[in-house]
Amino acid sequence: MGDSQVKSRYHHLLSTNDEPSPSETAEIRKIVEQRETAIGQLEAQIIELEETLNVLKDRHKREKDLLFPFQSALAPIRRVPCDILIEIFLFTRDWTDGSSVIRGLAPITVGITHVCSHWRRVALSVPMLWSIMEATCRTRDGEGTYSFNDSQIQTWLSRAGSLSPLDIICRAPYQASVSPTWMNQYLHRIRTISLIGGCFELPSETFDVLEVLNMSGAYGRREGDISAPALLRLGFEGGIEDLPRIPYHQLTHLHLDLTTYSTRPSAFLAVLSRCSALVELRALCYLEASLMSAYSSIPPPEDHECIVMHNLAAFSMSYPLVPWLLARLTLPALKTLQVERTFWSSSIYHSFQSRSSFSLKSIVLIHLRKMNYLDFFDLLRDTPSIREITSCGTLFPTPTLIAGLASDSHQGFSILAPNLEYLGICQISFPDNGFIVHDQVVLDMISSRDPSGQRAVCVESGSPDTKIFKSHSTREPSLAGEIPPFAMEQHLCEDMPKNKTVHHFFF
């Protein structure tokens, strides 16, 4: 009798709480005994199969363990020539990025020497791989005294050989106040130096090939004159009185963060007046309020009294320094301007542009106060050469802005910013307050500026809070329809709420 027939025969008992009859009880006991016997047999078979499976698993693991080294012997990486392997290893260095800030050493540089003896031999045979090093000052045995690990430093430097230029990072707690005297014998090879924290007193001898000097946390330093005939870049964070005594006239890149203390305006101008060769200047500075008030009451200098920086092409500045400094500089070669966290003055910018006669290509406006649409349109009129504009926390993509950028050839209006290729706006979204502009209005504006007369398109961005609008024929060769890298930098929008929206317009 099959299982279904058995269950059907005793359905009246299996589906209720009725008591079986004596004959039914005897039959059910036989069924229980049969099922228990069957289950016991199955459990015995399962145990036997599990034992067989475990044996097979163990054998499988042994086979894999045996196979792996043979597969490794055939791996393509083993056939890579040493010169190619060296090139790969060099990518493990954390190279400097072209700015004045020196990055640290990537831990993987040491890690590659632990992979195998062959890799270790190759890595140790390349002095350039070890020519960037980081020396950290620590306390010894809880004594409260700070020092560098000289043996570790010497081991590293021995791997760097005797010819490769050195990129050195020195770190120390601010309370340490130590001098990295161990580098004295390498002055003729040091290409970049970064002093972070309590590292004081650079040697006063000549740095023959020093190109980059970075000082972070420079408070109370009093070095003597530093001779560095090849020095081009300085990155500095601290007080202006603690600036190193270096040949400023030869610098091409200067990055200053003077926000820890208030700065005397005259001292700041004195530094800039010595930087006649600058190509890039980034400045964050709080000017002393009392002196700023006094300076504000003095009319801006005459054009011939302003500081002229003939080579400065990239200028970034923040905080109240901006309008005050624009009124005192002449920058005929300026191509890129970034202003941040300050108020905007159209009259000062107009005078600055008229005095400098620069052909500005890109401008970044970050969290500017008092810049309305009339100010923005004035900026475009004063700067017809502009190609790229990025706004973060300054402009809204409103109907007023879009209408001002549109071209109306029928009424004979001259187009604003005729060379504009890109406008990026990052701003808080206000869904119900009248700031929203319909996509079609934006497309009409971009189409009106396209001399081909073809319609603009809205491109899929892959993000719900980002919109991208492009003309039919994006201009060449400046952007070629690609979002400028600086527009994607996170720091531009780091203080924005999560409900921000980003608009990209390509013309």
Image: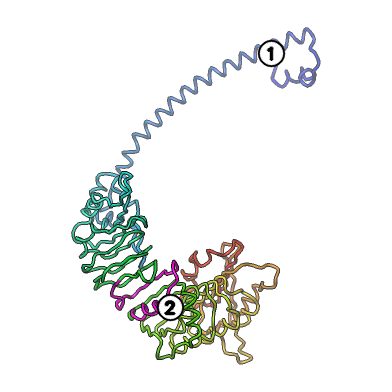
Q: Are marks 2 and 1 in contact (CB under 8 Å)?
A: no
Residue pointed to by mark 1: 31
Q: Nearer the viewer, residue 191 or 80?
A: 191
Q: Position of residue 492 (x, y in %)?
A: 51, 67
Give the magenta range. 245-274
Q: Position of residue 19 (x, y in %)?
A: 80, 13
Residue for point 34% across, 36% down: 67
Specify the quadrant of the image occupied by residue 302. Answer: bottom left
Q: CA distance from mark 2 to mark 1?
A: 102 Å
Q: Position of residue 101 (x, y in %)?
A: 36, 65
Residue 392: within the magenta? no
Asked if residue 76 can be seen in this view, the reply is no
Is 289 rendered above or below residue 201?
A: below
Q: Quadrant of the C terminus?
A: bottom right
How many residues crowd mark 1 within 10 Å: few (<14), some (14–19), many (20+)? few
Q: Position of residue 394 (x, y in %)?
A: 57, 73
Residue 246: within the magenta? yes
Image coloring type = rainbow
Q: Nearer the viewer, residue 356 or 220?
A: 220
Residue for point 23% across, 50% down: 155
Q: Nearer the viewer, residue 349 or 146?
A: 146
Sequence-earlier tag: 2 or 1: 1
Of badges 2 and 1, nearer the viewer stands 2
How many residues crowd mark 2 within 10 Å: few (<14), some (14–19), many (20+)? some
Label 2: which secondary element: helix
Label 1: which secondary element: helix
Q: Quadrant of the N terminus?
A: top right
Identity, as a three-letter code, of the amino acid under mark 2: Pro
